[in-house]
């Protein structure tokens, strides 16, 4: 008899439903999360904006050289001394020589200062975030896994740090510091006060993971605490940590900008977006472009990281409960 009966296929029985196809190779949770993220238009736009500013920061020396001006170089011919140093030309002195115009009074090229300001602002934000995430993850895992006295000490330290008036301490510390690397000091001070938030998230996640079957199996199999923490617990908390990281970065950028705006952050001639915004306040009515350009860069960067962080939290953090 011919096996190719109509309505049936080889290897199946008439009247039965074929078995579902196997999942494609490599379709793990991280691959699925990446696919879900890239489906969102807001994430694609956010990634494009972040990539643009990261490339700007990384290539700041090259970009300023292409523009023909260094961030500290004055161009007195680009400002009118008889009008209080107002830039010559429309839109704050925009011209083929100065692509984004110039600073009032000094005539420094705004494009060069913006790209170098991105380098300083993003370096401080990323370095401080790395300190916060590393310290918070280590403390949270230790508190959640070991419990007892370790948990009590670390939890009280978290409470103490979070209750401390961090902004006032930052302003005081940055104000009295003399003859120090202000970028390094600002990075350290911002990082010191940011870790308890991450530590609490990681501690809660660790408490829910340390009695899972695969952790108990590793413990029974003779694995030590270090191996269990790094091989079993850490991968389980990585999702919430990554989501929290992308939400911490915009806060760090804003904190650096706020401190520089208050005059206790990065000091001239080193450019910073917050410093430029502070200096532009005196000229917002005569040269609004000087205020608009660094403010727009700061706004777009913070917004892009916030959108990316919200999307990552939706996809990677099962506790968020959002879709």
Image (cartoon, rainbow, N blue to C red):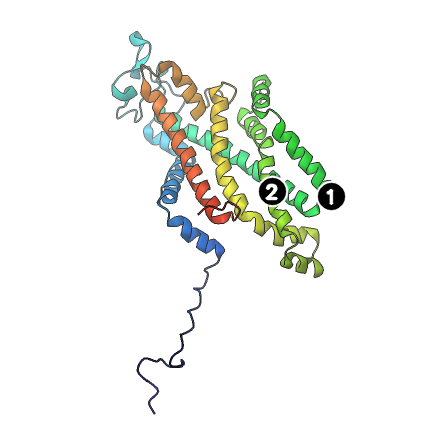
* 125 or 61, nearer to the observer: 125
Question: Which residue is rendered at x = 46% and y = 48% of the image?
Answer: 315
Neighbourhood count class around disc 2 (C-alpha, 10 Å): few under 14, some 14–19, many 20 upward: many
Q: Are marks 1 and 2 in contact (CB under 8 Å)?
A: no
Percent of width and height locating residue 1: 34, 92
Rendering coords of residue 217 (x, y %): 67, 60
Question: Label 1: few (<14), some or many (≥20) within 10 Å?
Answer: few
Q: Tag 1, which secondary structure?
A: helix
As drawn, is 269 to the left or to the right of 196?
left
SS under mark 2: helix
Residue at x-position 39% and y-position 42%: 47
Relative to 217, is 10 above or below? Answer: below
Query: Disc number at residue 251?
Result: none
Q: Who is closer to the viewer here, 215 or 282? A: 215
Identify the mark at residue 148; answer none if there is no mark.
1
Residue 296 appears left or right of 208: left
Looking at this view, is 152 or 15 the one in front? 15
Nearer the observer: mark 1 or 2; the answer is 1
Q: Quadrant of residue 150?
A: top right
Of 127 and 258, nearer the camera is 258
Q: Is residue 88 visible?
A: yes
| Residue projecting furthest to the right | 149
- Residue 174 point in image, percent of width and height: 56, 21
Q: CA distance from mark 1 to mark 2?
A: 18 Å
Residue 96 figure quarter: top left
- Please give the residue where the numbered disc 2 appears in the rendered image: 137
> Which residue lies most toward the front here?
15
Is 10 left or right of 144, judged from the image as shown?
left
The x and y percentages for residue 111 are 35, 27
Q: Residue 271, can we see it?
A: no
Ranked by sequence position, the earlier of labels 1 and 2 is 2
């Amino acid at each position: 008899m011919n096996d190719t009966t109509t309505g049936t296929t080889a290897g199946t029985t008439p009247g039965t439903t074929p078995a579902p196809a196997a999942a494609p190779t490599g379709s793990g949770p991280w691959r699925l999360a990446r696919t879900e993220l890239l489906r969102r238009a807001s994430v694609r736009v956010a990634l494009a904006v972040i990539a643009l500013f990261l490339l700007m920061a990384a290539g700041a020396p090259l970009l300023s050289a292409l523009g023909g001006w260094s961030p500290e170089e004055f161009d007195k011919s680009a400002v009118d001394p008889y009008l209080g140093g107002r830039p010559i030309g429309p839109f704050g002195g925009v011209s083929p020589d100065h692509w984004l115009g110039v600073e009032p009074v000094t005539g420094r090229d705004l494009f060069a200062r913006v790209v170098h300001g991105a380098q300083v602002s993003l370096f401080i934000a990323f370095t401080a975030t790395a300190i916060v995430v590393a310290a918070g993850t280590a403390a949270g895992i230790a508190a959640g896994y070991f419990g007892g006295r370790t948990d009590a000490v670390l939890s009280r330290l978290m409470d103490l740090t979070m209750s401390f008036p961090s902004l006032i301490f930052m302003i005081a510390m940055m104000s009295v510091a003399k003859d120090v690397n202000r970028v390094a000091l600002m990075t350290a001070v911002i990082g010191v006060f940011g870790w308890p938030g991450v530590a609490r998230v990681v501690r809660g996640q660790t408490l829910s993971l340390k009695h899972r079957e695969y952790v108990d199996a590793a413990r029974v199999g003779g694995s030590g605490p270090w191996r269990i923490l790094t091989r079993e617990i850490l991968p389980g908390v990585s999702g919430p940590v990554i989501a929290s990281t992308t939400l911490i970065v915009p806060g760090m950028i804003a904190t650096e900008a706020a401190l520089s705006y208050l005059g206790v952050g990065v000091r001239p001639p080193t450019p910073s977006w917050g410093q430029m915004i502070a200096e532009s306040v005196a000229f917002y009515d005569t040269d609004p472009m000087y205020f608009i350009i660094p403010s727009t860069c700061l706004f777009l960067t913070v917004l892009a990281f916030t959108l990316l962080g919200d999307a990552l939290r939706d996809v990677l953090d099962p506790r968020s409960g959002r879709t």
